[in-house]
Each structure stands twice: as C-alpha cells, then as structure tokens.
Image (cartoon, rainbow, N blue to C red):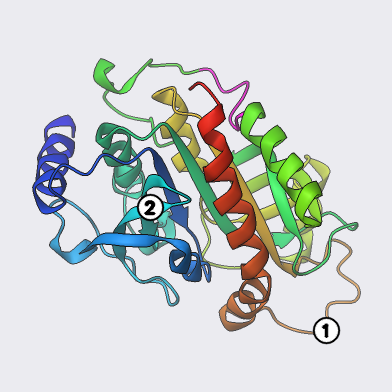
Amino acid sequence: MYEKIISTVDFINKKTNGFKPEVGVVLGSGLGGLANGIQVEYTIPYSEIPNFPISTVKGHQSQMLFGTIAGRKVVAMQGRFHYYEGYPMSEVTFPIRVMMKLGIQFLILSNAAGGLNPAFHVGDIMIINDQIHAMPNPLIGPHDDRFGERFPDMSEPYDKRLIKLADEIAMEKGIWVQHGVYCSTTGPTYETPAECRYFRIIGADTIGMSTTPEVIVARQGKLPVFGLSIVSDMGNIYGVDHTSEITHEEVIAAVNAVEPKLITLITELIRRSASIQF
C-alpha cells in the first residue's frame, strides 16, 4: 500500500510540476459545483491516476483539481469513492493518504445526508462535531507504522479550531448552521423507518454512506479535519407518515439549492484558516 501511495504521489507531482497543496477538499454528492470557486491550474481525471479507482456515482465528476481558493493552494476531489461501490476500504480511503503525502495541512469533507434530528430541515447545513462509524473500519488488516499508530485516538475526529472558525464565519455571513453527529452506513439502500429510529436513539443527527472512513484514516495520520453535512432529505424516525420515496435525484437537487452558501462558508474557512498554526 505505502509503495502504491508513493508511486501515485510521484505521478501527481510530475503532472502538476510539484504543486504543493495546503488544503485538501472532498466534494461529495451533488457538491461538485464547489469547484467553481477554485482557480484551477491542473486537472487530472481519476482514470489517469495510477492506483485510483473510478467513481461510479451519478453527480460525481471523477477528477482531481489543483489550484487556489482565496489565495491558498488546494487539491480537491471532485467525486469520492464509496464502500457500496464494491471497493475495499483501502481503496475508498486511498486518496486521503495520497493527499496527506502531497502535504496538505488539513482536510475539508462534505456530504449529502439524511436528517434524523426532528429539529432539522431539508437544506440545512450541519457542521459535524462527532461521528458514528457503522461500517467496516478502514484500519482493519496489516498495520504499517508509516501511516500512524495502530490504535489511533478518536476523541477529536473533527478539529475544534476549524469548527470555531466556521461558526464565526457563518454568524458574520448570516448563514444558518446546525451542529451534530454524522453516522455512516454501508448503503446503498436508504434507511428503513426502524433503522432511522435506531440511529437517532444512539445519537446520530444525520446519516449517509461516506466520510467517516476518510476521517479515521486522516486522524490516524494526525491530519485535522473539518466536516459538513447537507441535509438532503428527512429520514422518517416515526414510521407512520412515510408517504414518498427518497431518490438520488432529489438528494442532488436539495444539495444544489444550498450550494452558494457552501461556497461562501468553505471559501472563507480556507482563507481564514491561514491564521491557525497546524
């Protein structure tokens, strides 16, 4: 695995003339438009990158973008990989390890998620404070000390400094944000009413099919993480008023509606994060 990562990093460095990103960004389902805020210098399709899988999900562009946001160098994944696509966790999280080797200082993750908290509404932006990982752990298997500790601490999966900064930006810009716990399951089915009730009982505010494996790998490498969930639908935790089905198209539409606010929040977070000593 480590040798594959080095090989991939060497390829990217040659393709980008040694571009050194400061921030890594993963643009989740329906959030590819955030790329419009990047002054792109290099674009590399996943199909050209050695050892990279290909995203098969509608709404994912399957390419890496290298450029600047607010004057800071970034690498952005326009489309991510999911366990439900049939990839092992080592491949799902492979790009995160690559970005860490490229030298990013922190990671921004976004996802579209179902809302479980009755106080939430479709279109809400939730800053992720904590997570529940309800799928296989990406660190299962042979351990390589070069990636970090065998038993990494997860007491702060999402960086408190970045959360505080995002809150300040949201208040200043008049962007309403929620806070809560994100839960991930394998998918690809959406949750049953009983499953929604179960995950709500154990503490989840939103639920999706990504993100937490990436966070675990990042934290093993001591990389600070900031995460956002966009509430794309409301899970029925009571099971008595369920009158419509959830579709992927509806998820993307709900996320697209809140995209301008996301662009503002993430752009300002990247700009002002220069004041944080990582």
In the image shown, does 18 or 137 lie closer to the viewer?
Answer: 18
Q: Is residue 244 shown above or below 214?
A: below
- Residue 132 sits in quarter: top right
The numbered mark, 2 or 1, whose residue comes first in the sequence reads 2
Q: Give me the disc on residue 243.
A: 1
Question: Would you name the residue on which mark 2 appears?
Answer: 68
The residue located at (58%, 39%) in the rendering is 272
**Mark 2, other Cα within 10 Å: few <14 / some 14–19 / many ≥20:** some
Q: Give me the disc on residue 157.
A: none
Kindly tell me whether residue 191 is visible in this rendering.
no
What range of the chain is rendered magenta? 153-159
Q: Amino acid at mark 2?
A: Thr
Left or right position of 163 against 85: right
Q: Is residue 155 magenta?
A: yes
- Residue 80 sits in quarter: bottom left
Tags 2 and 1 in contact by the CB under 8 Å rule? Answer: no
In the image shown, does 187 or 41 lie closer to the viewer?
Answer: 41
**Mark 1, other Cα within 10 Å: few <14 / some 14–19 / many ≥20:** few
* Mark 1 element type: loop
The residues bearing labels 2 and 1 have C-alpha atoms spaced at a distance of 45 Å
Left or right position of 173 against 107: right
Classified by dominant secondary structure, the portion drawn in magenta counts as loop
- x, y (%) of residue 77? 37, 56
- x, y (%) of residue 48? 13, 62
- x, y (%) of residue 18? 15, 42
Q: Amino acid at mark 1?
A: Thr
- Residue 94 sits in quarter: top left
